[in-house]
Image: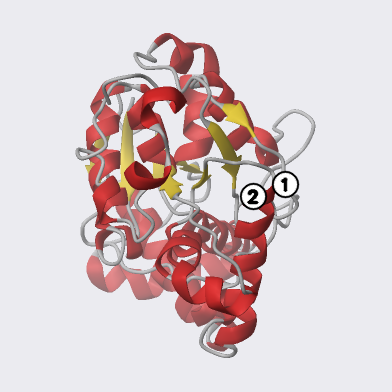
């Protein structure tokens, strides 16, 4: 499968282990990544609040670059915030031909044009809808036996459901659990799995943001999760990077490792923790999880 690959800003900046682990995992799933290196930030919903046309133009440019990738089946991202922001912009562009033509007028200066109908999917959706869970299961070399994983979706990949195409036929708000099970892990249900991590308000009210993150982490710990997994690097920043501060605000020890989705997949496909950059995390998964019993001896 060949995809026009949009890694996003954060995966190459604050969380390079996400971009790196995706590069390691892709060949093991027969996914060819054609990186959209000239693409810019999606705006994460923030730009659209101040200048909707600018946000739509920036994302239309990325879509146009993706459509130039010959032989690509679709565009793929590894950031659920990007998925949400891009889907919102694409909905506006696809719904109004005159507006799309206006935006394309700006892109024409760079010889670019967005044509309605691009398929853009997060890596999580690609795993379930394109590769398929049976195929993913067949490629597992090291089942995540006894690893108790709490899914953390974040906001932008689960709502609004209509825009994101979530329905009975495509229950995308259950995909993380399905993937965890396909990898051999145990899905842990807890209160915060589908709630906001708090990152969107961290610059406005850091205390409330980190209390929110700490509450979710505490809920997962109380449910006996070994770790969380998320398809969103912004969620990862609030849940892992900020976890020591969140501990102080909620008044309890958390010690909850937070894995990026490609890292969890990579472990099950046989890659080593160091190859996947687990040592870069603030809460080191290798120091909290008993790998000899949670996955397989000798890791």
For numbered disc 2, what is the local secondary structure? helix
Residue 152 in view: yes
Q: Considering only vertical position in the picture, is 172 above or below 131?
A: below
Which disc number belongs to residue 166?
none
Q: Residues within 10 Å of mark 2 (few under 14, many from 20)?
A: many
Asked whether 200 or 197 is in front, the reply is: 197
Instruction: Measure the alpha-carbon separation of dots 1 and 2.
Output: 6 Å
Name the image quarter holding residue 290. Answer: top left
Please say if 180 is above or below 75. above
Q: Report which residue position mark 2 lands on.
A: 220
- Asked if labels 2 and 1 touch by Cβ distance under 8 angstroms, the answer is yes
Which residue is tagged 1? 190
Residue 1: % across, % down: 33, 24
Q: Residue at x 49, y 81 (%)?
A: 47
Q: Earlier in the sequence, mark 1 or mark 2?
A: 1
Say which of 113 and 78 sits in front.
78
Q: Nearer the viewer, residue 274 or 195?
A: 274
């Amino acid at each position: 499968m060949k995809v026009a690959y949009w890694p996003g800003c954060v995966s190459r900046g604050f969380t390079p282990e996400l971009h790196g682990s995706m590069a390691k995992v892709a060949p093991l799933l027969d996914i060819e990544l054609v990186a959209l290196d000239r693409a810019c930030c999606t705006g994460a919903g923030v730009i659209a609040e101040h200048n909707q046309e600018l946000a739509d133009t920036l994302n239309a440019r990325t879509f146009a670059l993706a459509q130039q990738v010959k032989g690509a089946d679709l565009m793929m991202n590894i950031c659920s915030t990007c998925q949400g922001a891009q889907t919102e912009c694409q909905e506006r562009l696809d719904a109004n031909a005159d507006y799309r033509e206006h935006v394309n007028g700006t892109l024409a200066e760079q010889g670019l044009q967005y044509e309605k109908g691009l398929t853009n999917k997060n890596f999580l959706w690609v795993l379930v809808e394109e590769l398929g869970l049976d195929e993913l299961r067949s490629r597992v070399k090291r089942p995540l036996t006894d690893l108790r994983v709490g899914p953390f979706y974040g906001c932008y990949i689960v709502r609004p459901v209509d825009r994101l195409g979530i329905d009975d036929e495509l229950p995308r708000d259950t995909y993380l659990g399905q993937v965890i099970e396909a990898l051999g892990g145990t899905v842990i249900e807890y209160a915060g799995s589908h709630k906001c991590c708090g990152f969107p308000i961290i610059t406005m009210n850091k205390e409330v943001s980190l209390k929110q993150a700490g509450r979710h982490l505490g809920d997962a710990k109380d449910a006996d999760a070994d770790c969380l997994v998320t398809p969103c690097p912004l969620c990862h920043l609030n849940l892992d990077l900020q976890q020591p501060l969140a501990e102080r605000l909620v008044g309890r020890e958390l010690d909850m490792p937070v894995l990026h989705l490609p890292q969890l997949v990579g472990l099950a496909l046989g890659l080593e923790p160091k190859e996947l950059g687990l040592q870069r995390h603030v809460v080191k998964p290798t120091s909290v999880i008993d790998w000899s019993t949670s996955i397989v001896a000798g890791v």
